[in-house]
Image (spheres, rainbow, N blue to C red):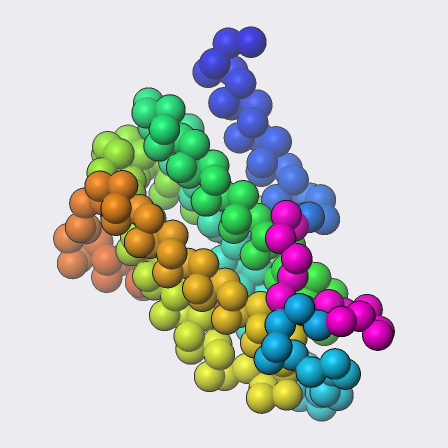
Amino acid sequence: MNPTLDIVLSTADNALRTLFSKPGARRTCPTFSKPGARRTCPTVPEHSTELSTQDKALAGALMRVNHVGEVCAQALYAAQAMGTQDPALRQHFKDASEEEGDHLAWTRQRLDELGARPSLLNPLWYAGAFGLGLIAGRLGDRVSLGFVVETERQVEAHLASHLERLPVGDHESRAIVAQMKDDEARHALEATRAGAQVLPAPVKALMGMAAQVMTRTAHYV
């Protein structure tokens, strides 16, 4: 098969799977939801804490925002893998995308458990993130990696704020978010070691503003 066609088909498949199919995870979720199942995370008690209606609504909104972040991560990495001519870097982006796929599956599972829905604007978020990834890729590999570093650092800070805002009794969501936060920090470190270029302060600020618009909207829609 033509290499370019193969990349295009793989990218299209990623988009369809992310937006329209139930994601599966390679790694075990930090928590199990089945009654009587042994917990994999020591911070999650054997029996779930019963959340109030208000706490469940808050947790659902926060996990919807986190799920949107993972939809965007799939789009970003797919676009950046398409944009690079370096096979090793393309594989780097694909590996990171697969691990982010675990986050996508975990957050979707938790949304289902909380009786919450994904964002209705997921196709829009995916398209926007894919466009940004393509732009970053066009600017060169070091810039593309720098975009990864800044994105992951902002996501890490965002997840830290969610750990403060999630209901104390929502052990399952908190365990998932904590693992995601650790993974995002590692992704930023790996991109730095791969030769990422530090982005200018105005670019970082614009990225932060765009992320705020997304998170505030996805909290409700």
Q: Residue at x 49, y 43 (%)?
A: 97
**Horizontal side of residue 206 vs 36, given as left or right:** left
- Span shown in magenta: 25-38
**Horizontal side of residue 134 vs 194, given as left or right:** right
| 34 drawn magenta | yes
Which corner quadrant of the image does residue 201 belong to? Answer: bottom left
Residue 108, position as x, y percentages in the image: 66, 59
Q: Residue at x 75, y 88 (%)?
A: 50
Quarter occupied by the N terminus: top right
Residue 79, position as x, y percentages in the image: 42, 35
Residue located farthest toward the right when viewing the structure as drawn: 35
- Give above or below for 169 relative to 152: below
For the residue pair 2 and 207, the one nearer the viewer reads as 2
**Horizontal side of residue 141 vs 180, given as left or right:** left
Residue 35, position as x, y percentages in the image: 84, 74
| 119 drawn magenta | no
Quarter occupied by the C terminus: bottom right
Residue located farthest toward the top when viewing the structure as drawn: 1
- Give above or below for 88 relative to 204: above
- Give above or below for 88 relative to 199: above
